[in-house]
Image: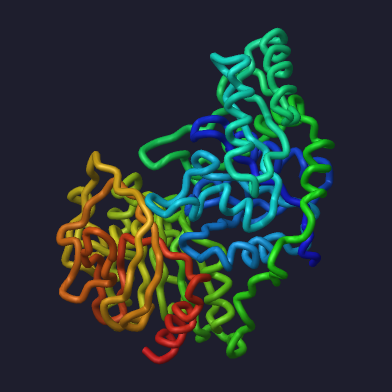
């Protein structure tokens, strides 16, 4: 694949401006024109990529310069964009908002610069006319290395309002590539951690993506947007696509092969595609199961990965599936490797909001009103099935729950920073923590995990 894949970054001055609607609608509109579209999301968000996948028919992938490091943004982008005609990258927060206290690191602007991709700024034009020119001029001139190639005006009230906005933006020298009228919001319901994932409302989500595509197709100049993407040139730095590597050993075709079970279904929707690819490359057969419905782990399970999601929403159903809870507890007690992040941590606890869970960890979990959110710099406190002592990884926390106690006698991570702390649990083969990590930043964790599955 050429490193000059056409690409656009969809950004905004702030959250709530409409970039998810525009990015997802643009992906679907390009796909409807017969283009193979590669969908990407800046930052650690797991939910938006699910809508991107519906729009494009391809796996939505994240580009996070904090979790993976700036040097991996280009290679991961090219990996996801293999065989595609065009790539659309949805930004995060405001264009220049990055990791707290880290300057531009992990901001949409930072990723756009790393990819040398033109930026389309989605501006909420409600309650302003000529002032929009000052706003756009400020964003376009703040960093000369960020190329704002055009503007899409959202929530425009009338033809007269549009006329005033266009007149003002002529003075700013930034072309208007689309105008979206103020219409009833596309049906994308939210709750305590953002949009409801696609897996929980698939039919309604398909309708919502269709509505986004229609809105963007009607209001945007798709030809001009595609031309802007094709003018992007080569991804800088001579980047080659990231690869998870080739399988170290052929996977057995018999039922007693090395199976790593990965939790899925409505309750466990948070995962990065690269994790499965790394496990497969390390020689595992990855099999997905649904803790809400499956009463047994997949046949031949030698290791278990339970990622993030919403167990608090499905606590009653998870608790009611007693056969699977017992199977998970028995696997963990056997010493088999178990890697659990956030929702997985809650599922392994003794109880969640008073309802019995797997009881692997002697800890209780409950919902709270407080949102815990942010990037974390962590180091493995001791050896585990996932990481050797001293392994440094960056992670992300995003939850409204608390686990008591917050760590076991052998914690998973030491979190660095102004207020250092230990966090998570390591016991026998179990590694459980609130931290979401991206294994592409440290591929050795997947190889270590599979090797422990092989020898445990």
The residue positioned 78% from the left and 38% from the top of the image is 225
Vertical comparison of 315 with 340: above or below:
above
The quadrant holding residue 364 is bottom left
Q: Nearer the viewer, residue 359 or 174?
A: 174
Vertical comparison of 415 with 195: above or below:
below
Is 221 left, or right, of 144 in this rendering?
right
Q: Quadrant of the N terminus?
A: bottom right
The quadrant holding residue 116 is bottom right
Residue 54 visible in this rendered orientation of the protein: no
Q: Nearer the viewer, residue 229 or 52?
A: 229
Q: How many marks?
A: 0
Q: How is the image coloured?
A: rainbow
Q: Position of residue 413 (x, y in %)?
A: 28, 70
Q: Position of residue 199 (x, y in %)?
A: 52, 47
The residue positioned 47% from the left and 39% from the top of the image is 195
Q: Position of residue 343 (x, y in %)?
A: 35, 57
Q: Nearer the viewer, residue 10 or 52?
A: 10
Q: Position of residue 236 (x, y in %)?
A: 70, 63
Is 269 left, or right, of 8 in this rendering?
left
Q: Nearer the viewer, residue 276 or 399?
A: 399
Q: Quadrant of the C terminus?
A: bottom left
- View extreme (top): residue: 160
The residue positioned 34% from the left and 51% from the top of the image is 311
Residue 320 visible in this rendered orientation of the protein: yes
Vertical comparison of 14 with 355: above or below:
above
């Amino acid at each position: 694949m050429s490193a000059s894949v056409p690409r656009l970054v969809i950004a905004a001055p702030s959250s709530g401006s409409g970039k998810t609607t525009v990015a997802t609608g643009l992906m679907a509109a390009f796909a409807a024109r017969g283009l193979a579209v590669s969908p990407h999301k800046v930052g650690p968000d797991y939910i938006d990529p699910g809508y991107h996948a519906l729009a494009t028919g391809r796996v939505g992938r994240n580009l996070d310069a904090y979790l993976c490091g700036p040097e991996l943004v280009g290679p991961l982008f090219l990996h996801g964009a293999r065989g595609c005609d065009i790539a659309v990258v949805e930004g995060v927060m405001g264009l220049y908002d990055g990791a707290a206290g880290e300057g531009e690191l992990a901001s949409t602007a930072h990723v756009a610069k790393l990819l040398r991709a033109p930026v389309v700024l989605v501006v909420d034009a409600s309650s302003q006319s000529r002032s929009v020119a000052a706003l756009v001029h400020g964003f376009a001139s703040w960093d000369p290395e960020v190329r704002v190639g055009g503007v899409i005006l959202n929530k425009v009230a009338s033809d007269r309002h549009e006329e005033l906005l266009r007149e003002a933006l002529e003075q700013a020298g930034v072309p208007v590539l689309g105008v979206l009228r103020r219409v009833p919001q596309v049906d994308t319901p939210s709750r305590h951690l953002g949009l409801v994932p696609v897996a929980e409302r698939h039919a309604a989500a398909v309708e919502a993506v269709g509505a986004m595509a229609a809105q963007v197709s009607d209001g945007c100049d798709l030809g001009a947007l595609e031309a802007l993407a094709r003018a992007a040139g080569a991804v800088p730095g001579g980047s080659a696509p990231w690869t998870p590597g080739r399988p170290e050993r052929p996977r057995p075709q018999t039922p007693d092969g090395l199976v790593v079970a990965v939790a899925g279904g409505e309750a466990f929707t948070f995962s990065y595609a690269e994790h499965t690819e790394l496990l497969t490359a390390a020689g595992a057969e990855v099999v997905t199961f649904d803790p809400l419905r499956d009463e047994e782990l997949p046949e031949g399970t030698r290791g278990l990965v339970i990622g993030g999601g919403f167990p608090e929403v499905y606590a009653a159903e998870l608790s009611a599936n007693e056969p699977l809870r017992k199977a998970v507890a028995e696997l963990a007690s056997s010493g088999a490797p178990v890697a659990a992040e956030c929702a997985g941590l809650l599922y392994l606890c003794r109880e969640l909001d008073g309802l019995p869970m797997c009881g692997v960890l002697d800890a209780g979990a409950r919902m709270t009103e407080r949102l815990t959110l942010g990037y974390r710099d962590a180091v493995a406190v001791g050896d585990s099935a996932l990481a050797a002592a001293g392994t440094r990884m960056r992670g992300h926390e995003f939850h409204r729950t608390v686990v008591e106690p917050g760590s076991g006698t052998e914690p998973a991570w030491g979190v660095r920073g102004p207020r250092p702390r230990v966090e998570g649990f390591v016991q026998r083969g179990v590694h459980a923590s609130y931290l979401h990590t991206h294994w592409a930043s440290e591929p050795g964790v997947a190889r270590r995990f599979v090797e422990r599955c092989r020898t445990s």
